[in-house]
Image: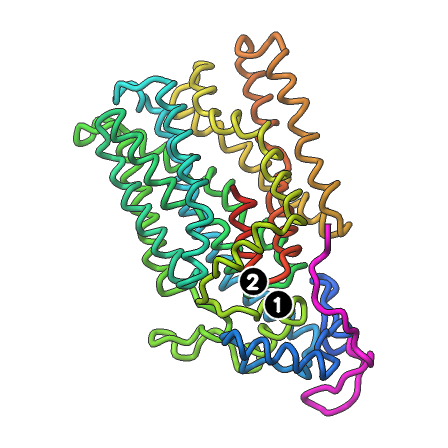
Amino acid sequence: MRAASTSSVEPESPTTKGQDDGVLQPASELSGSEEEGYDTEKNPFADPVVAEHWRQVYEKSQYESRHVFDPNLTWTEEEEKKIVRKLDWRICLWACVMFFALQVDRGNLAQAVSDNMLDDLGLNTNDYNYGNSVFRLSFLLAELPSQLVSKKIGPDRWIPIQIVLWSVVAVSQCALTGRGSFLATRALLGLLEGGFIPDIVLWLSYFYTARELPIRLSFFWTSLSVTGIATSLLAFALLHLRGVNGWGGWRWLFLVEGLITLVVGLVSFFFMPASAVQTKTWFRPNGWFTDREVGIVVNRVLRDDPSKGDMHNRQAITPKRLWEALKDYDLWPLYIIGLIEFIPSTPPVSYITLTLRGLGFSPFTTNLLTIPYNVFHIINLLLLTKLADKLNERAFVALLQPLWTLPCVIALRWWPGVVADKWGTYALVTVLASYPYAHAIIVGWTSRNSNNVGVRSVSAALYNV
């Protein structure tokens, strides 16, 4: 597997001139963070010929940040840490909030069925299975088209549109009448939510280096478990509304959580910047960064991967570039890993509420019992991603996920106490669902091995499929 390429030309000198005091200092003292792995000695633009080549590339592509490209810009380690913290609070945190919105509407069906939703609609478990299949198929079919739209109009526009549209469908689920409306809303949710994750990954790559991205993606995916905890508590309250207005509790669940998502989508129209140089708006006249901070944000990302400026952030992917990305066989092994890595763990987690209800737990107890595995899932996700970053190793670290789930799956299949011992079964399912989630590692790995923006856009979608 090839590593992400920056440039074949190495800088001629390990020293660089400080911008503020004009004194020659070691580049490692001027910029870089051990935590983030950045070092100006690896500045691919130290050679004027290389710098001029990329300047022409950025001009030709009309790269939105080309006017702040500066091969000679230097900054301190403390400045970079301060900017990364600001990015985490402004960019990464809001990405987590939007992922919360996705997971609320993507995952609340499992909580709804714990409140006898299937019986209320005259459905059975086969209908539930079919609905899940329709959703997943629609979700997967929408991944690549959604990413192409996002690249054309910009993720800062397309992502809020997605959230608002699927929130409307999510709210409409409070009026479900039977099998037809159930399957229709499942299909629409899949089509509208598909592509959201690769869209977010593309947006985050505009602000973070390849070394930083997996850690931020681990924060991003902790939102999945945080959402599970928050919605379990919310469901505990909302399901108690059964009978109010003649509705089942699950109808109130869809209504309230859909409205929460709608608010997130509307706010996202105003909160998501297109890039580091586009944070100033009529309602935010001063932007998020000073001119110097903008220069640092842009140049540190370009020095990490010069190809991040070879396309405008609102530039469509041509059929030629799409075909080149599709036939990039070096990324195919990562797609295969993404295809098979989560097979053992997905069914038990998807059916955990039905499993607990089948064990005899009440709807309210069932939702509360899903909280522990979400807590352990967060801890294991962060530890696994940190381990991969510490060891600078992805493949073997990602293997820890199937090694965790395999004994649990074997026990679920052949342990005589399954179902008969309800608390033992609950403990086993909880351990399985707490597996160390390797998704952030592999997504970051895929992004890092994509050698330009076009390939990165397509590979993010194909991996998620």
What's the residue at 65%, 79% (across, down)? 53
Residue 120 as seen in the image, left or right of residue 78: left
Q: Provide the residue designation for mark 1.
A: 307
Sequence-first tag of 2 and 1: 1
Q: Which residues are magenta?
A: 1-27
The picture places residue 196, in percent across and down from the top left corner, at 44, 50
Q: Give me the C-alpha separation between circle 2 and circle 1.
A: 7 Å
Magenta stretch encompasses residue 22: yes
Point out residue 290 in the picture as x, y percentages from the top left corner: 52, 80
Q: What colouring method underlies this structural image?
A: rainbow
Task: Give the structural element (helix, strand or loop) at label 2.
Answer: helix
- The residue drawn where x is 37% and y is 75% is 281
Q: Nearer the viewer, residue 371 or 118?
A: 118
Q: Report the side of 75 relative to 268 (left or right).
A: right
Mark 1 burial class by Cα count in 10 Å: few <14, some 14-19, many 20+: many
Q: Kindly indicate the quadrant of the structure image that contains residue 52.
A: bottom right
Question: How many C-alpha atoms fall within 10 Å of the one at disc 2: few (<14), some, or many (≥20)?
Answer: many
Instruction: Say what amino acid the circle numbered 1 marks.
Output: Ser
**Residue 110 appears anywhere in the view:** no
Q: Is residue 184 above or below residue 319?
A: above
| Magenta stretch prevailing secondary structure | loop
Q: Nearer the viewer, residue 214 or 449?
A: 449
Depth check: give the residue in front, 181 or 292: 181
Q: Is residue 41 above or below residue 333?
A: below
**Nearer the observer, 461 or 79:** 461
Residue 102 versus residue 316 in the image, above or below: above
Inspect this view and state whether residue 400 appears.
yes
Residue 453: assigned label: 2
Q: Residue at x 79, y 88 (%)?
A: 24
